[in-house]
Image (spheres, rainbow, N blue to C red):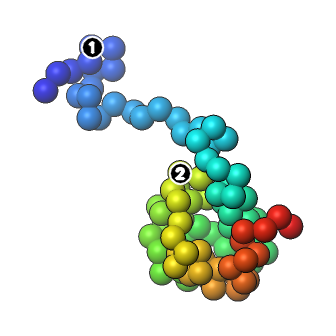
Amino acid sequence: MDIDPRMNLRPDLRPRRAFRPTRLCGKLRQLLAANIRRNELELSQEELAHKAKLHRTYVGMVERCERSLSVDNIEKIAKALEVEPSRLLSER
């Protein structure tokens, strides 16, 4: 495996580029991510993930608009936040 002399790391260990959600993420997904972050229950990511029965890193990636959600996961998160799923997809 080649080693990059600038980074002194193997290519598979180099840091990835920063994610830019405003360019790569659709408006609905941005809205969903923002609504999950601004929950009234003031749950931590870990608490939300536990209540929704999802992995903590997955919830973080959703909040940063790095992952898409299935309808099932939208429902799980809405249930954990004690709101209707439609509320996560609407402007407040």
**Mark nearer the N terminus (1 vs 2):** 1
- Location of residue 53 in the rendering, given as x and y in whole percent from the top left corner: 48, 81
| Rendered view: 5 above or below 16 | above
Q: Which residue is mark 1?
A: 5
| Rendered view: 44 above or below 52 | above
Marks 1, 2: nearer the viewer = 2
Residues packed near mark 2 inside 10 Å, few (<14), some (14 to 19) or many (20 plus):
some
> Is label 1 in a helix, a strand or a loop?
loop
| Rendered view: 58 above or below 53 | above
- Measuring 52% from the left and 35% from the top, which residue is drawn there? 18
Circle 1: residue type: Pro
The label shown at residue 66 is 2
| Rendered view: 25 above or below 74 | above
Circle 2: residue type: Glu
- Measuring 64% from the left and 50% from the top, which residue is drawn there? 26
Q: Quadrant of the C terminus?
A: bottom right
Residues packed near mark 1 inside 10 Å, few (<14), some (14 to 19) or many (20 plus):
few
- Cα separation between marks 1 and 2: 30 Å
> Can residue 50 be seen from the camera position used here?
no
Q: Which residue is more in the foreground, 24 or 1? A: 24
Q: Quadrant of the N terminus?
A: top left
Q: Quadrant of residue 55?
A: bottom left
- Location of residue 91 in the rendering, given as x and y in whole percent from the top left corner: 83, 64
- Measuring 59% from the left and 67% from the top, which residue is drawn there? 45
